[in-house]
Every structure is written in C-alpha cells, then in structure tokens.
C-alpha cells in the first residue's frame, strides 16, 4: 500500500468511527450490508492459511499446450487492484469476464466513502468481489463451474471432483438439511413457550410459507440422496435408525467414523481439520503397510523351491 492509499484508508477509518452508531456503518463494518439486485453476499474467509487445491481446472493456455494441472490458491485473488485480480480470475479459470460481470458499489449515507472502500480498509474486499463477479458471470453465461471451483477452494469438504467438475457432495446438502431441522425445531419451541406471541402473517400466508418450506426441504433431501461422497451424520435426519427410515436415507457407515470426515469443522465450515487430515494420513499409511506385508507373505508362500541338481542327488 503506497502513501496515498494509506492516507485514504486512515481517513475512511476515521469517518467510519464517527458514524459507527448509524445502521449503515455498523452493517458495513460487520460485512452484512446489502448490495441490491440478485447479488448474494457471503462473508470473507478469515483463515490465515490459504486453502490450496491442485486443481484439474485448466486455463486456456494449459489446455492448448501442456495439459498440466493448474495450481491455484485463494491468495491468487487477494488483491484490491481490480485489474490484476480479474486477470488472475480469467487465467485461473480459463474464462473471459465481461464489463457487466462486476460487483455494484455504493456510497454511505453522507457520501464520504463507498462500501468497497470500507471493505478494502477491513481487508475483506478482494475475495468478496471475486465471488460476486463469478456469480454475475454465472448468471450471464449459465456457466457455474468457476464459481463452484472457488467455493470448493473455500470449503473443500463440501465438494467432490468428478469428470472435470466440482460437484456438491452429501456433506454440502447434509449441512443445509441439519440447519433446516434446527431452525424448524427452534421455531416450534418458540411457539410453545410464547403464549401471547403476536401473529404477523395471516393463516393463508403461514400456510403458503409452510408449503414452500416443505417443498424446499424435500428438494434438499432428494439432492442429498443423489449427491456423491461419504454419507455424513446429520442430527435429526439419519442420526438414528428411525429417522433414517422416515426420510429414506442411509445412516453413516464405517467410512465416516474414524476418518477425517468425522469432525465438526467439516459439517460447520466445509473444511477438514488438521487433526482429521492427520488421522486420515495415518490410516492410509497403516493400510499401505498392511497391504505390503500381505503381498510379501503371499510371495513367500508361493515361492518355488529350488530343484536339486544332479550333483546334489545321492549316489548308489
């Protein structure tokens, strides 16, 4: 950051502090302000260690020349220079962004700085801009592979790489199903405990909302059944035989237990914990060692004994 950018950042921070009690400023500082239209907003990843994927996603150059794998990290897009960052996106995913594939910016209430200015100061702009631009690219072209690839870099446990594409797996849908179940239970508990709760919606509205929610939940279950990957442990869904039978799904098997998948970080954040990865590596090493010992034993058992020569035969 040069002196001009540093001074600008300090100025914005001072102004943000002055209006920190306003709803707009608080929302901007929390990273939850709305951007309008169809642009969804997701929080910036705060992991210090960048997620590294040796991705079979190939850039246009790689596809034409060496067919080698392209190795990209989240750091590839971590710059506030839009020209450099967008160039990195195009190179990494082999696409061409249009001038329409942008993330709309807007000024705060007193027109002193924009939402993007604030995010840059908070070091939360680059990845959010990359995500939003890939969303706009997907909407314009109906090509969602780059966005899925970026999501897989941020939450690798939620995706499988199949036939050259990142595909949402059972953990991705399982996490959403568990969230739906938790939210539903919370609502029912609140209704039971609050006797004088004010009814905001009419019965017709409530019925319509319930129908939409039920349909959405059924679609999640169907997506879960069709998704690839290891079957996770989903509370209230397949955590016991009766609920698994009710929803027509399998319970988690041995491939889930005692593996890197059996960790809260996987379901909550879509990331493998260092402990889980170490456990998986040790398990793989033990399996390789057992296989090597088995092959050595097999070779020893099937080894052909040496035939005696004429010199070894007894004489009459």
Image: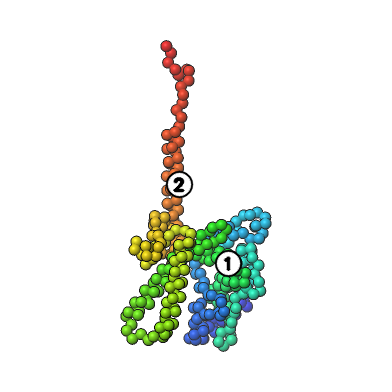
**Cα separation between marks 1 and 2:** 38 Å
Q: Which quadrant of the structure image shows residue 213?
A: bottom left
Q: Residue at x 56, y 76 (%)?
A: 39
For marks 1 and 2, the one nearer the N-term is: 1
Q: Picture coordinates of residue 45 (x, y %)? A: 51, 69
Residue 16 lies, in percent from the top left, at 53, 83
Residue 220: horizontal and vertical position, in percent? 46, 68
Picture quarter with the C terminus: top left
In this rendered view, identify the residue nearer to me: 271 or 120. 271
* Disc 1, SS: loop
Q: What numbered label is drawn on residue 258? A: none
Task: Left or right? Give the position of 95 relative to 271.
Answer: right
Instruction: Report which residue position mark 1 lands on.
Output: 144
- In the picture shown, does residue 310 fall above or below 196? above
Quadrant of the image occupied by residue 14: bottom right
Residue at 45% of width from left, 53% of height from top?
A: 281
The residue lying toward the viewer, choosing from 2 and 120, is 120
The residue carrying pointer 2 sits among few (fewer than 14), some (14 to 19) or many (20 or more) residues within 10 Å by Cα, namely few
What is the residue that sits farthest to the bottom in this orientation?
110
Please, what secondary structure does the residue beneath circle 2 have?
Answer: helix
Q: Are marks 1 and 2 in contact (CB under 8 Å)?
A: no
Q: Residue furthest top?
A: 316
| Residue toward you, 123 or 296 | 296
Image quarter of the N terminus: bottom right
Answer whether residue 191 is visible to the viewer in this image: yes
Residue at 44% of width from left, 33% of height from top? 302
Residue 74 shows in the view: no
Which residue has dot 2 on it? Answer: 288
Disc 1 residue crowd, few under 14, some 14–19, many 20+, Cα 10 Å: some
User: Based on the displayed image, in which of its 4 quarters is residue 134 positioned?
Assistant: bottom right
Residue 248 vertical placement versus 2 (above, below): above
**Residue drawn at (45%, 46%) of the image:** 288
């Amino acid at each position: 950051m040069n002196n001009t950018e540093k001074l600008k950042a300090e100025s914005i921070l001072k102004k943000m502090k002055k209006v920190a009690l306003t709803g707009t400023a608080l929302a901007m500082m929390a990273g939850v302000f709305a951007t309008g239209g169809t642009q969804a907003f997701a929080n910036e990843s705060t992991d210090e260690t960048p997620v590294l994927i040796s991705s079979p996603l190939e850039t246009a150059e790689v596809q034409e020349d060496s067919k080698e794998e392209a190795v990209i990290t989240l750091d590839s897009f971590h710059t506030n220079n839009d020209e450099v960052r967008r160039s990195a996106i195009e190179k990494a995913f082999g696409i061409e962004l249009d001038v329409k594939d942008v993330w709309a910016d807007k000024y705060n209430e007193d027109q002193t700085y924009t939402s993007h200015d604030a995010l840059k100061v908070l070091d939360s702009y680059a990845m959010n801009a990359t995500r939003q631009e890939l969303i706009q690219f997907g909407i314009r072209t109906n090509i969602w592979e780059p966005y899925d690839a970026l999501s897989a870099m941020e939450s690798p446990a939620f995706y499988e790489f199949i036939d050259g594409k990142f595909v949402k797996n059972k953990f991705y849908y399982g996490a959403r199903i568990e969230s739906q179940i938790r939210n539903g239970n919370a609502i029912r508990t609140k209704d039971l405990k609050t006797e004088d709760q004010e009814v905001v919606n009419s019965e017709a509205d409530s019925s319509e909302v319930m129908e939409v929610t039920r349909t959405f939940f059924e679609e999640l279950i169907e997506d879960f059944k069709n998704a690839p990957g290891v079957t996770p442990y989903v509370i209230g869904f397949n955590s016991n035989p009766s609920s698994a039978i009710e929803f027509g799904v399998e319970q988690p098997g041995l491939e889930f237990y005692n593996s890197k998948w059996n960790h809260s970080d996987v379901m909550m954040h879509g990331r493998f914990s260092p402990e889980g990865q170490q456990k998986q590596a040790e398990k793989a090493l033990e399996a390789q060692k057992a296989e090597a010992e088995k092959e050595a034993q097999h070779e020893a058992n099937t080894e052909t004994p040496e035939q005696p020569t004429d010199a070894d035969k007894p004489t009459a």
